[in-house]
Amino acid sequence: MRDWSYYGAAHRYDIHGDPDAEQRCTEVMRELRSAGDEDELRRRADAGDRCAFIALLEILVDADRLDELRARQEAGDDRAGATLLEVLVRQEREDELRDEVAAGHDVMWLLDYLSERGRADDALAALRQWAEAHPELDRLAHARRLDLLMAHGRVDEVRRAAESGDHTAVRRMRDLSRRTAAEMPGA
């Protein structure tokens, strides 16, 4: 993926707090990248330099070195894990995305991937499978299921759950009612 900027675009400004510092960071990292000094980037990144870390992520993604991202994630770096999942989504590598979710990553990456492609039933099946593997998160899984149904226009299923006494479904229906009322002309 050329010109990868997942972490850089989203976080450099927050790191520095002003556009001038962001620009300096971009220039230094560009120089290190163009010099091919990956060892220096890695040294800086491991020492806590966020700009170097961002540049290193970009190198790893550009070179499709996902095993290195995975290793960093397994060593406790959640930013590398999020980058790995984003790469898999962007490159439509569904089987690998499923493997990562099975290995313990947040199922939402897979649910969003499937939902964005109009595959609500596949997303619901993936959520069901995830919920079976994580029974301690059953309330979260249930809420996500209701959200998926609502997002795909399957309001009748949520309504039936609400009518049967499901408190979470009742809240979803109440929220829908409020949004609908707020969108009506003259409301």
Image: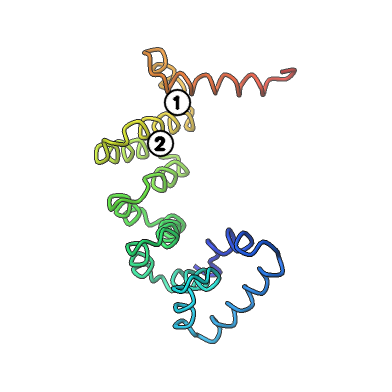
The location of residue 70, given as percent across then percent down, is: 35, 64
* Left or right of 1 on screen, residue 66: left
**Protein image colouring:** rainbow
Q: What's the amino acid at mark 2?
A: Ala
Quadrant of the image for the C terminus?
top right
Residue extending farthest right = 186
Per the image, the residue denoted by label 1 is 154
Image vertical order of residue 63 relative to residue 144, above or below:
below
Whole-percent x and y of residue 103?
28, 53
- Quadrant for residue 5, please give it: bottom right
| Local secondary structure at mark 1 | loop
Q: Do labels 2 and 1 touch, CB within 8 Å? A: yes
Residue 95 is tagged as none
Left or right of 180, for residue 147: left
Name the residue at 45% across, 79% down: 43
Name the N-terminal-most of marks 2 and 1: 2
Q: Residue at x 44, y 72 (%)?
A: 60
Residue at left offset 68%, top offset 71%: 23
Q: Residues within 10 Å of mark 2 (few under 14, many from 20)?
A: some
Judge by depth and name the residue closer to the eye, 127 or 47: 47
Res. 120 mark: 2
Q: Is residue 46 above or below residue 152?
A: below
**Image height of 92 relative to 106, above or below:** below
Q: As displayed, is residue 135 above or below residue 114? A: above
Badge 2 marks a residue whose secondary structure is helix
Residue 25 appears in which quarter of the rendering? Answer: bottom right
